[in-house]
Amino acid sequence: MGGQRAGTLAWLMINIRSSFWFVPMLLTLAAMELALALVEVEGAAALARRWPRMFGADAEGSRAMLSAIA
């Protein structure tokens, strides 16, 4: 009985992966997760406005840091 169930599960997974909607569904879910993460990052960027010394001074300081790295 267990072998038949494993075979049925394998058959089901093969059919799901080969169907037309599986990859687009995965990409849509990944895009939704990325959108949520970016919204959270934007909220964290508000911290940079509150505590500018913690995240860098200003545009001039960022420019100086990039020129030092380059």
Image: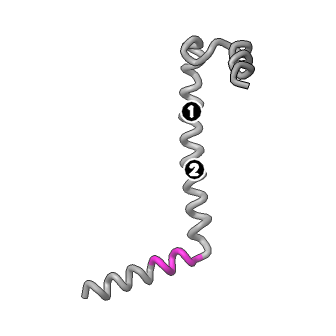
Percent x, y for residue 13? 45, 76
What range of the chain is rendered magenta? Answer: 13-19
Instruction: Give the residue pinned by disc 1.
Output: 41
Asked where in the image residue 64 lies, by quadrant, the reply is: top right
Relative placement, left or right, of 60 versus 18 is right
Quadrant into which the C terminus falls? top right
Relative placement, left or right, of 13 versus 19 is left
Majority SS type along the magenta span: helix
Q: Amino acid at mark 1?
A: Val
Q: Residue at 59% across / 38% down in the picture?
A: 38
Percent x, y for residue 39? 58, 36
Q: Name the colouring of the figure.
A: one colour
Q: Residue at 56% across / 61% down in the picture?
A: 26
Label 1 secondary element? helix
Asked where in the image residue 50 lies, by quadrant, the reply is: top right
Label 2 secondary element? helix
**Labelled pair 2, 1 in contact (Cβ < 8 Å):** no
Quadrant into which the N terminus falls? bottom left
Look at discs 2 and 1 and give the one toward the viewer.
Answer: 1
28 vs 14: above or below: above
Label 1, residues with CA under 10 Å away: few <14, some 14-19, many ≥20: few
Percent x, y for residue 63? 74, 18
21 vs 52: above or below: below
Q: Amino acid at mark 2?
A: Met
Q: Residue at 59% across / 44% down in the picture?
A: 35
Relative placement, left or right, of 8 versus 45 is left
The foreground one among 29 and 51 is 51
Instruction: Give the residue pinned by disc 2.
Output: 32
Percent x, y for residue 7? 37, 85
Q: CA distance from mark 2 to mark 1?
A: 14 Å
